[in-house]
Image (cartoon, rainbow, N blue to C red):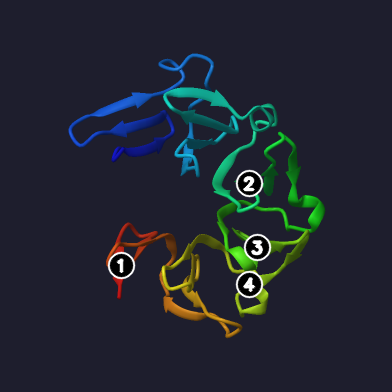
Amino acid sequence: DGYLWIGSWEGAARFNGRYFTTLDERSIPGIPLTGVRTILRDADDALLFGTAQHGVVRLADGVWSRLEPTVERRLRVISLARAHDGSLWIGTDRSAWRLWPDGRLESLDGHGLPQGSVYALLDADEDGVLIGSERGLFAFRDGRLVDRGRERGLGGVHIRALLRRDDGGLVVGGDHGAFVLEGDAPARRLLSEQVESLLEDRDGALWLGISTGGLVRHH
């Protein structure tokens, strides 16, 4: 619909180009919309809001609801991604979780994922789901976890952002800068500053959010 959505500690806000509409626990009774750390536009155009203390809530066709398994576990959500198999991946301050369409909630602790904050998730098709955490870059596919960062010379590097570019290339950003992963080659560094976020615009330019408060545009 062209609206801009923004998450904050107080809740969420919607901007229509002229003014903001704020949404929080007071304006939406029964919905724990506080500490919104991430917002995901789902495949059906619903919006999923990951909160810092109350799991995930959903907005679809003007109706708010709670993803109860995540609310009951009080997941402290940092990142969200929808996988091609329909499962919702949830990164928290301790691990990664999968919420299946039937309501089952599964932790990746049992698959050997090192404990730590998961800042970025990406469904990478044939590579499975990529997990960027403070413990490194991992890939989960067919029930198996692989330390993808160690394979590419990024073992243990703190990862904060993941981006699949339109040309198929993968960019990862974190405390040691930004890197491009192509084929089986070692990671190639793009930038040395700490990177918090990544975005590719409609012209194919890469934008990198830097922890010092700046933006870098890379062609």
Residue 216: give its label.
1
Of residues 106 and 209, the one nearer the viewer is 106
Q: Position of residue 149 (x, y in %)?
A: 63, 72
Q: Please name the residue that numbered disc 4 is placed on.
A: 149
Upstream in sequence: badge 4 or badge 2: 2
Left or right placement of residue 104 versus residue 210 in this view: right
Q: Please name the residue that numbered disc 3 is placed on.
A: 128
Q: CA distance from mark 1 to mark 3?
A: 29 Å
Q: CA distance from mark 4 to mark 3?
A: 14 Å
Of residues 43 and 10, the one nearer the viewer is 43
Q: Amino acid at mark 1?
A: Val
Asked if the residue under mark 4 is in contact with the one under mark 1, i.e. CB atoms within 8 Å, the reply is no
**Residue sitting at the far left:** 18
Q: Amino acid at mark 2?
A: Gly
Q: Quadrant of residue 144?
A: bottom right
Q: CA distance from mark 1 to mark 2?
A: 34 Å
Q: Position of residue 99 (x, y in %)?
A: 68, 41
Asked if the residue under mark 2 is in contact with the one under mark 4, i.e. CB atoms within 8 Å, the reply is no
152 lies above or below 70: below
Q: Answer yes or no: is residue 155 visible.
A: no
Upstream in sequence: badge 1 or badge 4: 4
Q: CA distance from mark 1 to mark 4?
A: 24 Å
Upstream in sequence: badge 1 or badge 2: 2
Residue at 60% x, 59% y is 134
* Mark 2 vs mark 3: in front: 2
Q: Position of residue 210 (x, y in %)?
A: 37, 62
